[in-house]
């Protein structure tokens, strides 16, 4: 069987079938590559979302940790200065010396030292004990 086109050119049916088969195979390959690309994009997007969620969780954790550390630190200073007021009012020289030493020790301690190892902070969060500042 042959087909006639303008100019009386005849193309054998086997050549037309091969051409059609080549087009179908090329379209199939293109569709498969498109599917693989969509899967890869979906995978990358999922990995991105997971990474972002992890980063956000770490950020939230550290911000919460900082809030707790500084709340505890503020409370400790308030308590120490209240004790200093009592020691000064009672004119107890030894108590004044001890409280001023404790204030100096707390003031010189790095508040971020507790956050060096996040496992320590996680353990602190999980425990019911107050943080030692």
Image: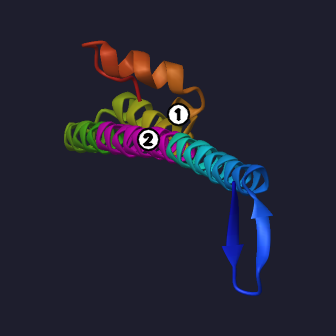
SS of the residue under disc 2: helix
Q: How many residues crowd around disc 2 within 10 Å: few (fewer than 14), some, or many (20 or more)?
A: some
Q: How many residues crowd around disc 1 within 10 Å: few (fewer than 14), some, or many (20 or more)?
A: some
Residue identifier under label 2? 62
Q: Position of residue 76 (x, y in %)?
A: 31, 36
Q: Position of residue 40 (x, y in %)?
A: 59, 43
Number of numbered discs visible in the structure rendering: 2
Question: Residue 78 colored magenta?
Answer: no
What stretch of residues is rendered in magenta?
A: 44-72
For the residues bearing labels 1 and 2, Cβ distance under 8 angstroms: yes
Q: From the viewer's perspective, is residue 55 above or below residue 8?
A: above
**Which of the two residues, 126 or 110, is positioned nearer the viewer here?**
126
**Which of the two residues, 39 or 87, is positioned nearer the viewer here?**
39
Question: Residue 65 colored magenta?
Answer: yes
* Sequence-earlier tag: 1 or 2: 2
Q: In which quarter of the image is the C terminus?
A: top left
Q: Position of residue 87 (x, y in %)?
A: 26, 36
Q: Position of residue 20 (x, y in %)?
A: 67, 54
State left or right for residue 103 relative to residue 119.
left
Residue identifier under label 1? 115
Residue 72 circle label = none
State the residue at coordinates (51%, 20%). Answer: 119
Name which quarter of the figure residue 129 lies in.
top left
Name which quarter of the figure residue 88 lies in.
top left
Q: Main secondary structure of the magenta part?
A: helix
Q: From the viewer's perspective, is residue 48 above or below residue 69?
A: below
SS of the residue under disc 1: helix
């Amino acid at each position: 069987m042959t087909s006639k086109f303008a100019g009386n050119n005849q193309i054998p049916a086997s050549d037309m079938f091969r051409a059609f088969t080549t087009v179908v195979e090329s379209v199939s390959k293109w569709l498969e590559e498109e599917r693989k690309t969509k899967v890869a994009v979906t995978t990358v997007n999922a990995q991105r979302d997971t990474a972002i969620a992890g980063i956000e969780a770490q950020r939230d954790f550290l911000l919460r940790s900082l809030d707790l550390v500084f709340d505890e630190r503020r409370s400790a200073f308030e308590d120490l200065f209240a004790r200093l007021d009592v020691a000064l009012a009672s004119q107890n020289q030894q108590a004044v010396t001890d409280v001023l030493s404790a204030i100096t020790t707390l003031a010189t301690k790095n508040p971020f030292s507790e956050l060096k190892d996040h496992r320590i902070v996680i353990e602190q969060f999980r425990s019911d004990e107050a943080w030692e500042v």
